Image (tube, rainbow, N blue to C red):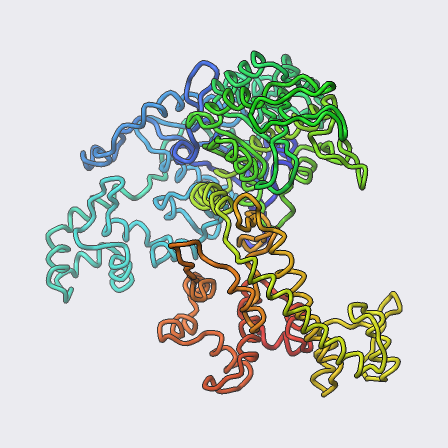
Amino acid sequence: MAGRARGGHCTLADRPFIRHIAAMTDSAPPRHVYLVDGSGFIFRAFHALPPMTRPDGTPVNAVYGFVAMLMKLLAETDADHIAVIFDAKRENFRNAIYPEYKAHRPPPPDELIPQFALIHEAVEAFNLPSIRMEGYEADDLIATYTKQAVAAGADVTVVSSDKDLMQLVSDKVIMFDAMKNREIDAAGVIEKFGLGPDKVVDIQALAGDSSDNVPGVPGIGVKTAAQLIEEYGDLDTLLARAEEIKQPKRRQNLVENAELARISRELVRLKDDVPVEHALDSFDKRMPDHDTLIAFLQAQGFKSVIARVEAAHLADGGAPSAGSAAASPPPPGKSAYELVQDEKALAAWIAEATAEGAVAVDTETTSLDAMAAELVGVSLCVEPGRACYVPLGHKGGAGQGALDFGDGEGKDAADAPKQVKLKKALALLKPMLEDPGTLKIGQNIKYDALVLSKYGIDVGPVDDTMLLSYVLDGGLHGHGMDELAELHLGHTTIKYKDVAGTGKAQVTFDHVKLDKAVDYAAEDADVTLRLHRVFKPRLLAESMVSVYETIERPLIPVLAGMECAGVRVDPKALKALSRDFTQRMAGYEDEIHKLAGEDFNIGSPRQLGEILFDKLGLDGGRKGKTGAYATGADVLEDLAAQGHDLPARVLDWRQLAKLKSTYSDTLVEQINPETGRVHTSFMMAGASTGRLASTDPNLQNIPVRTEEGRKIRRAFVAGKGNKLVSLDYSQIELRIVAHVAGIDALRDAFRDGHDIHALTASQVFGVPIKGMDPMVRRKAKAINFGIIYGISPFGLARQLGIAQKEAKAYIE
């Protein structure tokens, strides 16, 4: 198995499936056979995706998910023979053995029933064998073809996570869980059952399977079954020696249900000699007929899939298929975007968005600060290439014809452009933007939702392309629209400076001329919808549905509410702190100048370096590329540790200057005059570790380690009748690591209530825990968290101020 390519982590953008299918041999003997458990795929796709219908109203969410997963598999596998295997009718030879087999299963959901036939059509449209056989389950056919392939010398990948198929795993056969993107080999089977693949049947015969109504032996689960089979070797031996079992109840169950265990074995054992009707050789991978595939996709209304298939086809020199111009949308920016300037046209777009059930939404405003921003316009997109911009607050020109929208109606200036009155437009938009049946799609939609909330609109439900990208690709790249459009659509977006200017000449968007505004704003909505159609199917294919649906998406309104609520700060306390910092900084300045023997600009690294290393002649001076001495905190701390007073006082001065400029002065300026509170912005896709980041201002980094920093914290106050509550997980990341990685030493430390950072410090630095210097513990904390997030010896050495060799030893 070593070295065999099982696929990889490339995406469709990296390796279009059509190009990969083209790179194959004609009717060559099988070397790598892919057997896809189609029935398993159907149900997982159906339950993972929200309801979707094609133009005639037929449900197609399972079809869409199935197609997305199939395309991903075809793009990533090196298999030369592929088949998709399905169950036939529910009853098969096992029902003759045990009539209650699977009898308790409910019928499939009504919305799924019409999709079965469409999924078989999908497989055929991709020119893949669609295999099923009356009287047998898909698992039996997979077992039979697996046996034939191995006999022919081929490797086999069974694309499924079904535990029943784990009995097939061997040195020539692995399973691939496409949802979790992971292989299951013999070690994976042992992890699941406690013993290897050759013992799976016996274990299942004892444990039974409630999902298939396989009875097993009462009172025996998988863990106990594995222990018994390991002790007695096999099921027959165990049953023959059941009277030896020491536990009375277990002994009784085994004796009384021995025949039931044997029946269960026949139910779970896969039949590998089915007289199959299709030869293995006929599974050789073939290129789909482009027009047939496109026709199928068009019938389902899968526009984004069509665009990907067409793009790959044209890239390979293929001719556009019949009707492809209509089916494949024009590239972003090449569309005739519509400028909506009257209520009738706006109502038509709203009606179309409501009927479609999904619409990309973007707002244009006067500020990046959602709490301070005024709404200038709204753009909508219902399908790629069809987008509009609704101007609501544009003025006549830079600095001219200012409009007063305070009453919601507006007063037209002499040169103001024609646009829908703000109050009228919002009244029309509000029902659609709040409609629970219409999905609103945005790029960082939290911002748009916050802006619109100030106008009385509670936007929802929502999807966010920025978060979809973040969930799928994490720290691989940024998640801004410009970067995503380049990466996934091959499109360079219009930049803000292109329509609003740069530098001192830059204007806010309400002064941008409408002929420029419409292309810029509508493109944002168009690109957002296209990105959504790229990302959303990947959630299912890459097993990230639960992360997005249960963690990231529900957090959007929570954070929006937090940002809107803000936090109260005491401006009097902050101003008093600023005055105190100013006075103390002045005292430090006098002391520093006396120690230096002259006045100089303490905030100038160049002047400070010259004083320290040229005039005073202190050791350790290092000049950088600019010719100036390095005077960073690490340099000054080293000098202070050597007993030099001047660098120590400069550190004190810098600390106060930092607190004053970053917190006491700035926080006062950032108090919203309308709410009297500070409103941060939480970045949901800013940290590769998955944490939130706080900006403008950063409220997650208020100092606490020094008395001066704690004074800043005391300026945050609760409103009348309220209290501030502080909650924190205790070393949650390390607890997760201890559990997931199964590290006994960590588990024991947490179980015994030890301070894990102090324990690490004690072991690494050889110091007792009792009376430990807090700085030593802090170094150990840096080691612990650094290792979790993949810090290098270089990074740790730099953080702790030690040699790389020493840092490497700590990590090891």
On screen, 615 above or below 127? below
Residue 109 position, x and y percent, is 32, 27
On the question of residue 400 being in view, the answer is yes
On the question of residue 151 being in view, the answer is no
Left or right, residue 478 beside residue 777: right
Residue 43 position, x and y percent, is 38, 33
Residue 238 position, x and y percent, is 21, 59
Left or right, residue 785 beside residue 377: left
Residue closer to the observer: 792 or 84: 792
Residue at (83%, 78%) from the top-left corner? 621
Q: Residue 746, located in which quarter of the rendered image?
A: bottom left
On screen, 93 above or below 687? above
User: In the rendered picture of this protein, how many numbered marks are placed on residues?
Assistant: 0
Residue at (63%, 49%) from the top-left corner? 476
Residue 426 position, x and y percent, is 53, 24
Q: Residue 330, located in which quarter of the rendered image?
A: top right
Q: Residue 617, located in which quarter of the rendered image?
A: bottom right
Left or right, residue 494 beside residue 687: right
Quadrant including the C terminus: bottom right
Residue closer to the observer: 199 or 479: 479
On screen, 774 above or below 511? below
